[in-house]
Image (cartoon, rainbow, N blue to C red):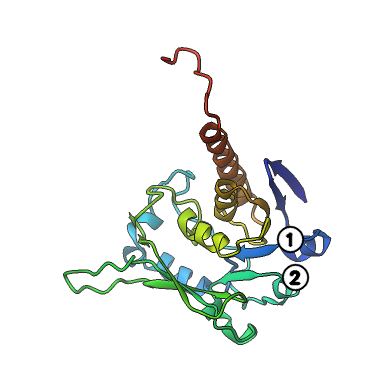
């Protein structure tokens, strides 16, 4: 196991099922676990012409084809997270709803952002994603376009095949008004940690894949650098920079 401390973020490289019992108290959990959609990814790789150009492009993470997600080829068991007994948001809940408690507090992420295709052509991938929550009784909707290369934000930043926008994870965290420490046991490329940095929340992230762990460390460190620059009312000019 490897541990990195970046600002108020504590990042673990390892298996969350082994690390979770060793953690102290957290206030909330926001995560996008591997929920058994591996067959869909395999289909996309076999039929690349229909998989979306972004999947094959070299991106800022220097990857041409994204690696498979560890654990995405088996059904997901949410019980270790539910046993934490904290306010929780679990993305992909529709894939394992039978293993979740009943709840009216679902979140719908509209990936088309409410936009309509004037040609009438159907989008080849999901137009929305669903998250289960044990907080609240109403269904909430987040509208943020994110479809391959068509994005409202973070264009060209394709770090992870199931990456969420920082905007979406930020809104999730903001649902927990009083939560100071946020846990993401399936951290991926660190989007939840970036959102926590931006919001001034403490973060605990766990990732099993070394490559994505390193990407998460870099992204979260960059977020803290940007935050310090923003918070400093009188940033010192760099050498050679005009005052």
The residue under the point 67% across, 64% down is 28
Q: Estimate the spatial distance between the alpha carbons at disc 1 and disc 2, rounded to whole Å.
A: 8 Å
For the residue pair 231 and 197, the one nearer the viewer reads as 231
Q: Position of residue 27 (x, y in %)?
A: 71, 62
Q: Is residue 58 left or right of residue 133?
A: left
Q: Position of residue 180 (x, y in %)?
A: 68, 55
For the residue pair 25 and 210, the one nearer the viewer reads as 25
Instruction: Look at the picture and state if 163 lies above or below 197.
Output: below
Please indicate, yes or no, whether residue 85 appears anywhere in the rendered image: yes
Q: Is residue 129 left or right of residue 214?
A: left
For the residue pair 147 and 41, the one nearer the viewer reads as 147
Q: Residues within 10 Å of mark 1 (few under 14, many from 20)?
A: some
Q: Is residue 111 left or right of residue 179?
A: left
The residue under the point 72% across, 52% down is 12
What residue sits right under mark 2 in the picture? 84
Q: Residue furthest left?
A: 119
Q: Residue furthest top?
A: 240
The residue under the point 47% across, 43% down is 62
Please indicate, yes or no, whether residue 68 appears anywhere in the rendered image: no
Q: In the rendered structure, which disc, 1 or 2, sits on the residue that comes first in sequence?
A: 1
Q: Residues within 10 Å of mark 2 (few under 14, many from 20)?
A: some
What residue sits right under mark 1 in the picture? 26
Image quadrant assignment for residue 119? bottom left
Q: Position of residue 147 (x, y in %)?
A: 36, 62
The residue under the point 55% across, 80% down is 137
Q: Position of residue 86 (x, y in %)?
A: 71, 70
Q: Are marks 1 and 2 in contact (CB under 8 Å)?
A: yes
Quadrant of the drawing holding the C terminus: top left
**Element type at mark 2:** loop
């Amino acid at each position: 196991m490897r541990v990195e401390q970046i600002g108020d973020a504590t990042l673990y490289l390892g298996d969350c099922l082994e690390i979770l019992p060793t953690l102290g108290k957290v206030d909330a959990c926001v995560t996008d676990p591997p929920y058994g959609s591996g067959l869909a990814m395999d289909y996309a790789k076999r039929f690349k012409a229909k998989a979306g150009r972004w999947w094959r492009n070299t991106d800022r993470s220097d990857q041409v084809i994204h690696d498979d997600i560890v654990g995405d080829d088996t059904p997901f068991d949410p019980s270790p997270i539910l046993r934490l007994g904290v306010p929780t948001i679990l993305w992909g809940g529709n894939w394992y709803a039978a293993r979740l408690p009943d709840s009216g507090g679902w979140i719908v992420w509209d990936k088309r952002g409410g936009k309509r295709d004037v040609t009438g052509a159907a989008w080849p991938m999901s137009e929305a994603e669903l998250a289960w929550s044990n907080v609240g009784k109403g269904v909430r909707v987040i509208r943020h376009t994110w479809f391959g290369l068509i994005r409202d934000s973070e264009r060209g930043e394709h770090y992870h095949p199931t990456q969420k926008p920082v905007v979406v994870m930020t809104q999730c965290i903001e649902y927990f008004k009083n939560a100071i420490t946020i846990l993401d046991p399936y951290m991926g490329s660190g989007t939840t940690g970036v959102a926590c940095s931006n919001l001034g929340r403490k973060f605990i992230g766990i990732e099993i894949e070394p490559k994505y762990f390193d990407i998460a460390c870099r992204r979260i460190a960059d977020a803290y650098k940007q935050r310090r620059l923003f918070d400093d009312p009188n940033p010192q000019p760099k050498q050679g920079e005009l005052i």
